Image (spheres, coloured by chain):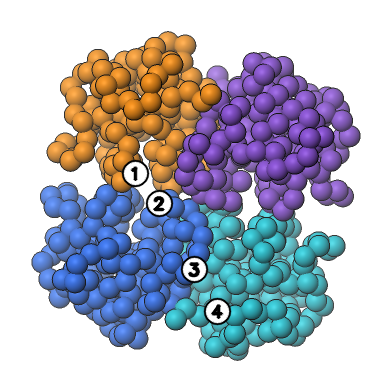
Chain colours: A blue, B orange, C purple, D cyan
Amino acid sequence: MAMKMIGVIGAGSCNNETYELARKVGVGIAKMGATLVCGGLGGVMEGACRGAHEAGGQTVGILPGPDRADANPYVTIPIVTDLGHARNVLVVRSSDLLVAISGGYGTLSEISIALKLGKPVIGLGTLPNMEGVQYVTTPEEAIDAIYNTSAVPLA
Amino acid sequence: MAMKMIGVIGAGSCNNETYELARKVGVGIAKMGATLVCGGLGGVMEGACRGAHEAGGQTVGILPGPDRADANPYVTIPIVTDLGHARNVLVVRSSDLLVAISGGYGTLSEISIALKLGKPVIGLGTLPNMEGVQYVTTPEEAIDAIYNTSAVPLA
Amino acid sequence: MAMKMIGVIGAGSCNNETYELARKVGVGIAKMGATLVCGGLGGVMEGACRGAHEAGGQTVGILPGPDRADANPYVTIPIVTDLGHARNVLVVRSSDLLVAISGGYGTLSEISIALKLGKPVIGLGTLPNMEGVQYVTTPEEAIDAIYNTSAVPLA
Amino acid sequence: MAMKMIGVIGAGSCNNETYELARKVGVGIAKMGATLVCGGLGGVMEGACRGAHEAGGQTVGILPGPDRADANPYVTIPIVTDLGHARNVLVVRSSDLLVAISGGYGTLSEISIALKLGKPVIGLGTLPNMEGVQYVTTPEEAIDAIYNTSAVPLA
């Protein structure tokens, strides 16, 4: 039986404060027994993977380039696509629910696809005022929102 | 020498008024000697292809499904991808500049990728208040904006 | 109404003799009023595009990288995918029939997908002994084979 | 640190004998502490996942369709691509080495891409006479070959 998959999306580089937010979200995802899915690179993706990995969880990194070496050091399952930005769609499709943390146009493209596919999106310090995004202000609220929004019961 | 490629993005179904906007934009694109690029389906995509085709232009439809028969009847160059929403990235990458007409989350994902890649985006009755989008209010203004934004001289 | 699309697949670099074979096949495809589809790069792809373009035909190049500048100079409709080898599937799917000229493992992957999808494959100096490939020995025979295999009548 | 990834490729439906071959290979992959990568569907893919899963290993299924429910019941990490046959390239790119078991044209496309990318391919009852494939005749030999071919030391 496949585990629950929670996506974390956000910028590939970020300040320490945002990195810590992502890390706390990653910890929470691991503690609920879910697998973290992300784009596998740095910034928010690394922070989230680090938190999940350090809490004993699994981390899937769906990489845009042709080389596994691009994965951040906390990715345990690297998926090498060489699809460029088209891999964003795979991050969304492989996730039951997404948490958007900070982010720019790449993150916006992922939020858009998620909403188009009817997947829940939780926003933490991300692009504002998007209809369909459930905004929260702390990592703890993000984790609570994952529990509350989940259609599928967690293990 | 490859021709200039102008993308038109927007919803796969739309009302008559929006269809006519798209059609007029398509006519203008064909008249400037450019090739129209789109997702190949109905609604705004069909309106734009129809306008371009009836004005003697070429129309590329980058289709999401496995079947060429999904193309609207005004697509002259159907590209069959079977990539689902990931084909949105190809529409953007294959275009020098994009015109967004109306549209929802799918269009938003395309605008996001275009802005991430630094491509000009002209918005006509599309999602409001996006930084980086050049908003216009008529098809004529859209065509003027294409002429004015183009880095590469048109044939 | 979309035109008939004929794919030409083969190595990205080749000797003059193979280039001339590809060029003659390209001429024949243009003369039958079909659109040539290929991977857009050099070698066999360039030879075929050159022949088709010089004979007044259209040439679609479905490029693997992120940059239109990679297209050979005889591509009239460049499709920019940034999908790497995954773009091979799009070359096959967008073609009604494929002609394989010379080629290595990349070409073999395209022949495999074509046969899996039930598309006719004509082989000219390509990988030998593949069940399902119709082998010919001259460009003229390749063009005859296109006429004879086509399920869809040409314009 | 990411674990070693071993791909298993082969037909989506197969007889019991082939299923058992795949299962034994899956057991061996799990026992060496590697993660199994495959296309996530039935037949050889299911046999291999089942063996690996029952031996306590991890199994990544890179699915061609839009729905996680297509995964066989032994996939622990489902990756949902909706890319159709283009997902074959991701199976290859995500693997350090591939074992081909039985299989038809889809498998041939994967072997071709693997050889193009310079990845080792071990063949067990698969398409014959391919230069570059290391042929073996039993699951035990396949596992030995993985140990012997691996450039990267296993955990």
Q: Secondary structure at mark 4?
A: loop
- Residue D78 visible at all: no
Residue D60: x and y in percent read 51, 71
Q: Residues within 10 Å of mark 2 (few under 14, many from 20)?
A: many
> Residue placed at 81% from the left, 61% from the top?
D130
Q: Which residue is mark 3?
A: A68
Tag of residue B117:
1
Vertical placement of residue B29 versus D140, above or below: above
Discs 2, 1 touching: Cβ within 8 Å? yes
Q: Give me the C-alpha separation between circle 2 and circle 1.
A: 10 Å
Indicate the position of residue A62 as horizontal and vertical percent values. Answer: 43, 64
Residue tagged 4: D4
Disc 3 residue type (three-letter): Arg
Q: Which residue is mark 2?
A: A85
Q: Nearer the viewer, mark 3 or mark 2?
A: 3
Name the residue type under label 4.
Lys
